[in-house]
Amino acid sequence: MASVANPRGRGIGRGRGFGIPKGKPGETQTADPQKNSSNVKSLDGFDLAKVLNDKLRDETMATPVQKISQYISDSDSSSRIKEVVDHLTQQTIKNSEFAPVAAKVANKLCSDESFGNAFRADLLKSTQEHYKKRQSIREKSLAEWIGIASLICELFNHLRSTDGAPLKPLAGAVHQTMSELLREGQAGGEEEEVDEIDCFYGHFKTAGKLLESVSQVRGNKYGAFLWGDLDKNQ
């Protein structure tokens, strides 16, 4: 793939966010996305870190998700939704390989009839706050930036609307994120290039295919990305 010119120091592009509607009174608010709450154990003894561990796989996911659903439903759902969202996000930031698990768990929780809509709104709001701060996150830690990028791409891969379609508000953020991974990786040093380029190609086949399907609906808005013209839609 042709190299994309980017003088060092240009920084990451602006992006337009996810298009999440403003919260209504009484809706949950996400805490500071930079605050790590992934190691916090609930006062009632429920240990999210133990339930949502790195060894979780598709075939072992049903029971942990059921436990989390019950945990959210048993008390003040707004505070517990925030707790679960924070944990999924922070664990992915620390370990980008957890992103597919986090997205699959999130998708199952979003389908819960009692709190699913609130969970999805809080999750997208939290992810958007991280997305907005991605440049400062990258400057602080390349690994955390890759974790955020992986989370955004995997949420796009797995979260679905009620009609089974990908969440279109995420498409712009995925396009921008993957463009930045490729551009910054090509402009960076050897270690940065390997990490960011590997992350880009790791998500290109899945997220790229979904972007293509969304672009067909939205007048080819993101088609330039799939054809390698990364200077458009920046």
Image: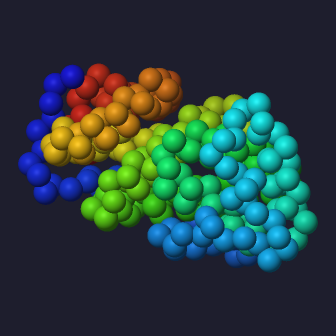
User: Farthest residue toward the left?
Assistant: 7
Q: Indicate left or right for 20 with 230 as reference.
A: right
Q: In percent of the image, x 67 and y 49: which residue is there?
A: 53
Q: In percent of the image, x 70 and y 45: which residue is there?
A: 105
Coordinates of residue 118 in the picture (x, y in percent): 73, 59
Q: Indicate left or right for 151 with 64 as reference.
A: left
Q: Indicate left or right for 218 with 102 as reference.
A: left
Of residues 131 and 22, the one drawn nearer to the viewer in this rendering: 131
Q: In percent of the image, x 31 and y 41: which residue is there?
A: 196
Q: Which corner quadrant holds the C terminus?
A: top left
Residue 35 sits above or below residue 6 on the image: below
Coordinates of residue 140 in the picture (x, y in percent): 31, 64
Residue 163 sits above or below residue 212 on the image: below
Coordinates of residue 220 in the picture (x, y in percent): 39, 28
Q: Indicate left or right for 67 with 10 as reference.
A: right
* Camera sees residue 57: yes
Q: Which corner quadrant holds the N terminus?
A: top left
Coordinates of residue 25 in the picture (x, y in percent): 70, 76
Of residues 225 and 107, the one drawn nearer to the viewer in this rendering: 107
Residue 198 sits above or below residue 34 on the image: above
Res 104 → quadrant: top right
Q: In percent of the image, x 69 and y 35: which residue is there?
A: 57
* Camera sees residue 167: no
Q: How is the image coloured?
A: rainbow
Number of labels in the image equals 0
Res 107 → quadrant: top right
